[in-house]
Image (cartoon, rainbow, N blue to C red):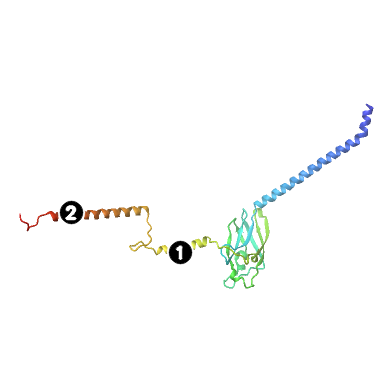
Amino acid sequence: MDAIWQFLDQHLGIWAAAGALTSLGTLVIVGISAKAALGQLGEARQLRLAETRPFVVIAFDMERAETIIYLTIINTGPVIAHNVKFAIDPPFTTGLDTNLSMKTTDLKLFTEGIPSLAPNSPISFLFNSWLQRGDGLHADRYEVQITYDGLEGRSYEDKIILDLGVYRDMRNVSRNGLHEIHAELKSISESLKSFKADFWGGVRVMTPDDLKREQEEKDRRAMEWAKEQRAKRSDEDRGQTSPSEDDPV
C-alpha cells in the first residue's frame, strides 16, 4: 500500500498537467467552433440583407439601335427603393442639350431624385446619338454616386462608372424590337385599307360562313341557268314537231 501511495505522489503532477492540457484543448475547440458559428451567422445575415435590399443600377443601353444611346435606370432588387438620388461627375452633356429646351441634367429625376423605384420597372430615355458624340465636346466617362433607402430605413450607397468609350468602334447586328414590329404592323394596316373586294380583284377576307353562302348562291344560279336551258330546248323541240298551217291535211 505504501508503494502505491508513493507512486501516486511521484506522478500526481503529471496527471494534473495532462488534465489541464485536456481542458485547455477542449476550450480551444469550443472557441474555434463558436467563432465559426458566429462567422456563419454573420454570413447568413449578410446574405439575408443582400436578398432583401434594393439595388439601383444606371447604365447605357446600346441594343435598341446602332446609332442611338439610351440611358436606363432600374432597381434589380426584390424590394422598393426609396429616395433615390444621383451625383454625377462630370455632369452629363449630350448633343441634344442644344436642341432641346431642357438639358439632361435638368431632368427632375436628377435634380430632385426618384421618390420610389419599384423592382424591375426601368426608367429609360433617349440620351444621345453616336453621330453627335464624335466632336470631342462630350466626355465618355462618368462617375455616378447613387444613394437610396431600403427596408427599415436602411441607407445604401453605390458607385457606378459609366464609360461610353468601351462601346466605341464596336460592330453590332441590328435586332428589331417592339418599336420596329409596331411600325411594320402599322404599315401593313395602312396597306390593307386600300384593298377592295370588287369585280376587278383584290384581297377578300371571308369567314367560313361567307364561303358557304357564296357557294350556295353559285349553286342556285347554276340550277336556274340549267332550268332555263332545258325549258328553251323543250320549246324548240315542240316548235319543230307541231304541223304548219300551209301543210296539206
Left or right: 8 as drawn, with respect to 219: right
Quadrant for the C terminus, please: bottom left
Percent x, y of residue 75:
61, 57
Describe the element under mark 2 as helix, strand or loop.
Answer: helix
Left or right: 177 as drawn, with respect to 209: right
Residue for point 78% across, 44% down: 32
Percent x, y of residue 226:
24, 54
Q: Earlier in the sequence, mark 1 or mark 2?
A: 1
Q: Amino acid at mark 2?
A: Ser
Residue for point 59% across, 71% down: 132
Q: Up-down: is 112 above or below 46?
A: below
Percent x, y of residue 159:
68, 61
Tag on residue 187?
1
Q: Amino acid at mark 1?
A: Ser
* Quadrant of residue 139 within the rendered picture: bottom right
- Point out the residue furthest to the left here: 249
- Numbered circles on residues, count: 2
> Marks 1 and 2: CB-CB under 8 Å?
no
Left or right: 160 as drawn, with respect to 29: left
- Point out the residue furthest to the front here: 248
Quadrant for the N terminus, please: top right
Describe the element under mark 1 as helix, strand or loop.
Answer: helix
Tag on residue 205?
none
Crowdedness near tag 2: few (<14), some (14–19) or many (≥20) residues, C-alpha within 10 Å: few
Q: Which residue is mark 2?
A: 234
